Image (spheres, rainbow, N blue to C red):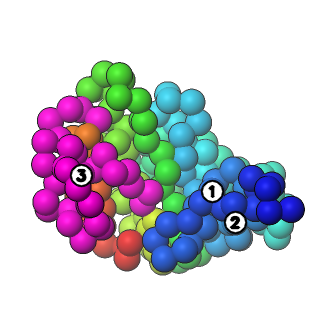
Amino acid sequence: DDDDPRRRQPRAFGQHPVDAGDADVVDAHDLVAHDVGGDGGFFGHRQVGGAGRGDGDGVGDLARPNLGVAPAELSKLKGKVRHFFHLAAIYDLKADAESQIAANIDGTRNVVEFAKAVDAGHLHHVSSIAAAGLYEGVFREDMFDEAENYDHPYFNTKHESEKIVRRESKVPW
């Protein structure tokens, strides 16, 4: 049924599926990081053989290097992650600046480092138009440097997190 919202999968970055809530869009070699309640944690989801969220579920911490994943687990994951989807962030314009910096900037930097540590094939960073600040008019993905008026903590942290991916990631994005 075309009216079923589960059939309308969000798409980004060349039509790669990014909906962490639907086990069908992630396969055995993909990881998804998304917010699990605004406390800085993330839910790491690895679908195994269509089993959905059972085998491979885990919780990490955006505030910790390598997302708090133990070295032994990093070793197991190295070279086995084809796609790493980063959806974790604070999306609240009213959140305090410190929380937004911790999640959106420091968290993104930790995600970038984790993706490198596991030698991910591709990092999918789900951005926001807020990275453009208050730019007026059409803002395309190739216009990152044209962003303006992003003094508000939310706009600033979204801009800076995107900059981290663009300039610091050693993993293709």
Q: Residue at x 50, y 29 (%)?
A: 38
Residue behind mark 3: 132
Q: Are marks 1 and 2 in contact (CB under 8 Å)?
A: yes
Q: Which residues are magenta?
A: 125-154
Residue 60 seen: no
Residue 29, percent across and down?
64, 72
Q: Residues within 10 Å of mark 2 (few under 14, many from 20)?
A: some
State how far apart marks 1 and 2 are (Cα).
7 Å
Residue 165, percent across and down?
30, 62
Residue 8, percent across and down?
69, 60
First of labels 1, 3 by sequence position: 1
Figure label count: 3
Residue behind mark 1: 19
Judged from the image, the secondary structure of the residue bearing numbered disc 1 is loop
Judged from the image, the secondary structure of the residue bearing numbered disc 2 is helix
Task: Examine the image and state in which quarter residue 140 appears.
Answer: bottom left
Residue 52 against residue 34 in the figure, above or below: below
Amino acid type, mark 3: Ala
